[in-house]
Image (cartoon, rainbow, N blue to C red):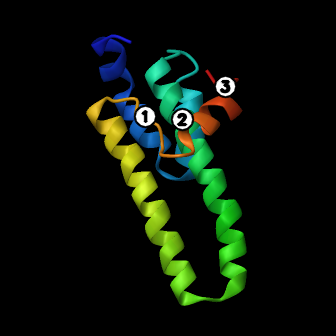
Amino acid sequence: MDQHTVNEGKTLALVAYLTLIGTLIAFFMNQEKRNEFTFFHIRQALGLGLLYIAIGYVVSSLDSMMLSMSFWIFFSVLFLYGILGAITGKLNKIPMLGDFFQNLFKSIG
């Protein structure tokens, strides 16, 4: 992937990490350009967002402050890792889950 492609897709890649609505906005805005860098980060952000909702539903029903704080810290670090990858123009996969998200959502892009 060349530097021009990365620079062109940085903004939408960053938008993809701003909630699931941001992911949808980035996806639809990228349909015309078909930027692979942006699609990579859309797949990562979509996987993180859906996993956040699924695990958050379970954690919220347990009513444990310690578990809730651990959950928030864990996902904050993962989202920041993805955002920093989008800003710096790198294809950083989310640790432990990045390959799974890329394979699961390979039809996107």
Q: Which residue is painted at 27% across and 34% down in the image? A: 88
> Is 39 above or below relative to 85?
above
Residue 60 falls in which quadrant of the image? bottom right
Residue 37 falls in which quadrant of the image? top left
Check disc 2 and give the amino acid type: Ile
Q: CA distance from mark 1 to mark 2?
A: 7 Å
Q: CA distance from mark 2 to mark 3?
A: 11 Å
Secondary structure beneath label 2: helix
- Location of mark 3 (residue): 106
Check disc 3 and give the amino acid type: Lys
| x then y, percent, for residue 51 | 64, 55
Ranked by sequence position, the earlier of labels 1 and 2 is: 1
In depth, the one of 59 and 8 nearer the eye is 59
Q: Quadrant of the N terminus?
A: top left
Q: Estimate how packed mark 1 is, as few (under 14), some (14 to 19) or many (20 or more) residues with alpha carbons within 10 Å.
A: many
Q: Is residue 101 visible?
A: yes
Q: Estimate how packed mark 3 is, as few (under 14), some (14 to 19) or many (20 or more) residues with alpha carbons within 10 Å.
A: few
Secondary structure beneath label 1: helix
- Location of mark 2 (residue): 42
Secondary structure beneath label 3: loop
User: Which of the numbered marks, if any, corresponds to residue 56?
Assistant: none
Q: Are marks 1 and 2 in contact (CB under 8 Å)?
A: yes
Q: Which residue is painted at 54% across and 46% down in the image? A: 96
Q: CA distance from mark 1 to mark 3?
A: 16 Å
Check disc 1 and give the amino acid type: Ala
- Location of mark 1 (residue): 13
